[in-house]
Amino acid sequence: MKISADWLNKPSTRLVMERLVSKGYKAYFVGGCVRNTLLNIEATDIDIATSAHPKKVLEIMENAGLKALPTGIEHGTVTVVADKTSYEVTTLREDIETDGRRAKVKFSKSIFEDAKRRDFSINAIYCERDGTILDPLEGIADLVGKRIKFIGDPYTRIKEDYLRILRFFRFLALFGKEDENHEIEIAALNDLRDGLDTVSAERKTGEILKLFAAPSLKYSILLMEKANISSKIFNSFNFKSLKNLKKLEDRLEIAPCAIRRLAAYTDDDLKSHLRFSNKIAKAHKVLREEATSQKDAAELSYRYNEKLALDSILVRSSLHGTEPSGNIFTRIKLGSVSKFPVKSADLIEYFSGPKLGEMLADLEQKWIESDFTLSKEKLLVSIR
């Protein structure tokens, strides 16, 4: 079996592989790039497994005039940059000792041994540089069957890296199917949930963002709560509201949005114990606040932007179990194109200092309440 893809035939990709193979080393693509290509999904990260020692990888790539960075050399990983594309090149290895965050490794020349230390069977599918598939752990069967399975014993795999607890739910949301029996996995995830305390807030935040952006997250979140994982991540959470939001997204054909979904699911301060950016935390805070306000879609769009207005209305509807108005998109467009006709210069004849700002705000609110119809003349007449 062979795959074909643009990334596989890209000159920079072929160059990196050719450099390794020409020196007598084995080299295979592995992980997400192979998995996604098999599913006809865009591959974003290109990972390469090689029999070359990491120091040898550095030497080979630097001699080829390529930028090579020892980003994780203690674990066998070198980042190679060719034609503005990054390639994670990792030496085939076995994990011989771990503490749930980092592993001591033994380099290997066997893809079977390398595959056994990976997290899920769907991520242990390899291919050669011509696209020929190598599937040492029958990951393709699980990919086709939409089964998310730990490789070997779930307890062992999770203890190697406790972030795999969250990765399980993310991959389930992306590639799994609902109602699949995961009793064994849920038991392991529940028993080992305290291991998440040893994982950095940055790594947990990254996984949460990816999970909440996944199209089919509902079943994953349900199982997260069943395994008592949500309570390890959030102080408060509301599955019913998230479920309501997912129904609205599906019915209105609105693309998933992690921040919108997080706003429906939790009222936590996203910077309190995770590491969300200021921009994301601020947007989440606005969505939660506007969910309890009386502003309609037009005013929200005028004061913020079209997307935040739509997200605010959807979160509000989800939290209260109501339906947004049928003309929501028309109202949002109205607010986004409306321009307040009065400026500070129009009022300096009558007001100054703080009073000027107060009057400007009062006139703006009056204009909004007129559904953006009051003219500049009528607004100014009202203060004379």
Image (cartoon, rainbow, N blue to C red):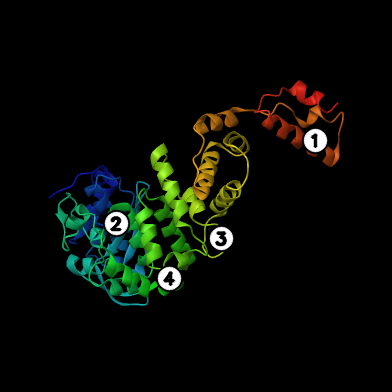
Q: Which residue is mark 2?
A: 47
Q: Secondary structure at mark 1?
A: helix
Q: Which residue is mark 3?
A: 271
Front disc: 2 or 3: 3
Q: Secondary structure at mark 4?
A: helix
Label 3 environment density (alpha carbons within 10 Å; few <14, some 14–19, many ≥20) = some
Front disc: 1 or 4: 1
Would residue 143 be visible to someone looking at this image?
Answer: yes
- 21 or 305: nearer the viewer: 305
**For residue 32, which quarter of the picture?**
bottom left
- 60 or 75: nearer the viewer: 75
Q: Which circle marks residue 359 in the picture?
A: 1
- 153 or 324: nearer the viewer: 324
Q: Which residue is mark 4?
A: 196
Amino acid type at image mark 1: Met
Residue occupying image coordinates x 50% and y 32%: 329
Front disc: 2 or 4: 4
Indicate the quadrant containing the C terminus: top left, top right, bottom left or bottom right: top right
Instruction: In the rendered view, tell whether residue 105 sits above or below residue 296.
Output: below
Label 4 environment density (alpha carbons within 10 Å; few <14, some 14–19, many ≥20) = many
Spatial separation of the CA atoms under disc 3 and disc 4: 17 Å
Residue occupying image coordinates x 42% and y 53%: 212
Dot 1 or dot 2: first in sequence order is: 2
Q: Is residue 322 left or right of residue 14?
A: right
Q: Residue furthest left?
A: 1
Dot 1 or dot 3: first in sequence order is: 3
Q: Position of residue 158 (x, y in %)?
A: 33, 71
Dot 1 or dot 4: first in sequence order is: 4
Residue occupying image coordinates x 71% and y 24%: 374
Would residue 21 be visible to someone looking at this image?
Answer: no
Q: Is residue 381 left or right of residue 337?
A: right
